[in-house]
Image (cartoon, grey):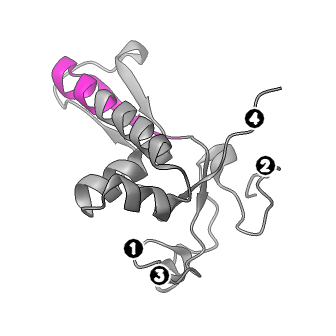
Amino acid sequence: MPRPRKWRKVCCLPSSTRFGPLNGPIHSDLFITMTVDEYETIRLIDMEGFTQEACAAHMHIARTTVQRIYNDARKKMAECLVNGKILRIEGGDFQLCDGLEETCGCGGCLKHRIGRGTAGKKSNWGVSSLSVSESRGHQKKDG
């Protein structure tokens, strides 16, 4: 029996979930799907300037896992840019940050979203939108 996948802590969901060329046809074979945890590694490493080690600590996973996720995400971005494909961000093994950690300072966590009216709302992120109090061994959809 394979080992269960570990949840990756994600501080914020992307405000846009689809990116791509504006001048091309939209066919299902032109889509590349990036998971939310892949998006989070790009955000933390490329936008926030984290090292892979710091990113791993922030997401509660091993550095080697971050390296693999990050490499996969960059390949997907390159595929979209070079071949004119559409990038969709959805799914993955993640758990939204509850904002209660001392190291949390991203501004995207639940405690930071309360004032913006998005905390507690249902999302369309599928099985990966988990309530914070759940155990890691069980999946439960919000709503």
Q: Which amino acid does the dot numbered 3 rest on? A: His
Q: Which amino acid does the dot numbered 2 rest on? A: Gln
Residue 3: which numbered mark, if any? 4
Look at 21% across and 22% down and name the residue there: 84
Please state if 44 lies on the left or on the right of 2 as rendered: left
What percent of the width, then of the height, locates residue 59?
51, 59
Q: Comparing marks 3 and 1, which lies closer to the viewer?
A: 1
Residue stretch in magenta: 76-90
According to the picture, the residue beneath numbered tag 1 turns out to be 106
Judged from the image, the secondary structure of the residue bearing numbered disc 2 is loop
Q: Comparing marks 4 and 1, which lies closer to the viewer?
A: 4
Residue 26: which numbered mark, if any? none
What percent of the width, then of the height, locates residue 134?
79, 62
Look at 33% across and 21% down and name the residue there: 26
Q: CA distance from mark 2 to mark 4?
A: 15 Å
User: If you read the primary sequence from the N terminus, does the residue marked by circle 3 or circle 2 appear first?
Assistant: 3
Reply above or below: 3 against 96: above
According to the picture, the residue beneath numbered tag 2 turns out to be 139
User: If you read the primary sequence from the N terminus, does the residue marked by circle 3 or circle 1 appear first?
Assistant: 1
Q: Which amino acid does the dot numbered 1 rest on? A: Cys
What percent of the width, then of the height, locates residue 39?
40, 47
According to the picture, the residue beneath numbered tag 3 turns out to be 112
Look at 34% across and 17% down and name the residue there: 30
Asked which quadrant contains residue 23, the reply is top left
User: If you read the primary sequence from the N terminus, does the residue marked by circle 1 or circle 2 appear first?
Assistant: 1
Is there a contact, CB below 8 Å, between mark 3 and mark 1? yes
Look at 48% across and 62% down and name the residue there: 57
Q: Residues within 10 Å of mark 3 (few under 14, many from 20)?
A: some
